[in-house]
Amino acid sequence: MPQIAGFRGALWDPSKVELAKVAAAPITGVAGLLAGGSLVRDNTRAVYLYHQTFEHERRQVTRKMVLAAAKLTPWDERTIRPHEETDAAARDHAIAGIAAEHAHTEAVFVGYRDAAREVDRLFRRTEDDKPTLDTTTADGSRHRIWRVTSSEIIGKLRPLFAPKKLHVLDGHARYEGMLAYQAQVVAEETPMYSTANYGLVCMVNLEDPALVVAPRHHIVRGAGKRDAVLEAAKPFFVVDKLAGLASDVAKQRAALASTLAHQPAFVVVFAGDPDAWKLTLSPDVAPTAAGVQIHRALQKYDPVVIQKLFLQRIAPGGSETVTDAAAVVKAVAGGAELGVIARPLAIEQIVHVDELGQLLPFGSTAFTPALANLVVYVVDPDEDVV
């Protein structure tokens, strides 16, 4: 049962900062920003309605979210659920950042089920008010924040979430960093409702049509040459040549969209090769039978096939992930041995993973566009949330 609460957020003073720039950048030096007045803490506890408006598939859409404090609970309690493995370096970086700032400067992005849109209805009147903060970042996204101090709304919000689960969409390392910092600062006498026992979350309805899942593409350095890689792939994949399409991301995506029978598929581009290559898992190949260690229900998810079968066994090397397919093409042109262009998972696939209690490989999913850093959660063991 997730416990949701209001908190005294620290918000930017638009008269002292260039809001569009600071909203899109990591926040460091919180104590100094508070002392100098660039960040200002609210006098009363609140939750923060957050609307993000952006262009998706040639139309403007608005993703509706709520920033709140959520009680920190271990993964094994299954109240807040992960779907992806956490990278140790990312987790250590998150722990160090929270410990240095004594604050959560980035929210963990979580989803919840609300087919009746009860949460949206709760904030309907708030949307008619002037936003507390309103800015458009360089990526074209408009970000609006409303401070909601109404005890009636916060009081209704908490029981709405009581029967739900929170599904972590992005920020697994940040959440583990929050848990680690909680363990460091919470003492036996720390109040139950201390801010140290809660963490900053940005909550979105999983039914929201503006919840956009992005694919994680791969740039690989140190992999083998094209002919050797493709030959090694043939026992597992149907290999199709996309003649002259190594630099044409739009046509690569179209080729992936035409994949039949929902088979796992991805596009590979190689250094010095004008062609692209579409690899589709052969219908008679079961990754678990080929030695891939994963739950059978997830063995044909694209990220599993890409990372655990193709990259680890066929084309091993140093891999990094990006959400921009054009960046993969550029990196390969600039010297990387190969790039992998992937498709996004569906939101129901992601939720299915955590409902099974399983984890996808690190770097499997992303959500776009990026959230803005407009509200800071200050951790003070002696201060309570609502």
Image: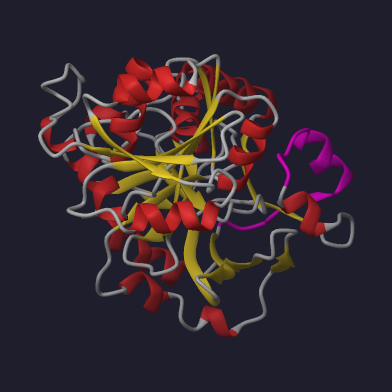
- Asked if residue 40 is among those painted magenta in the image, a careful observer would answer yes
Q: Is residue 78 left or right of residue 223?
A: left
Please say if 151 is above or below 6: below
Q: Residue at x 58, y 70 (%)?
A: 53
Q: Position of residue 181 (x, y in %)?
A: 51, 23
- Residue closer to the observer: 327 or 44: 327
| Segment tinted magenta in the rendering | 25-45
Residue 18 picture quarter:
bottom right
- Asked if residue 115 is among those painted magenta in the image, a careful observer would answer no
Q: Is residue 81 left or right of residue 32?
A: left
Instruction: Report whether residue 40 is seen.
Output: no
Q: Residue at x 56, y 33 (%)?
A: 273
- Residue closer to the observer: 364 or 257: 257
Please say if 127 is above or below 51: below
Mark count:
0
Residue most extreme to the front: 243
Q: Is residue 289 left or right of residue 47?
A: left
Q: Position of residue 256 (x, y in %)?
A: 36, 52
Q: Position of residue 88 (x, y in %)?
A: 47, 17
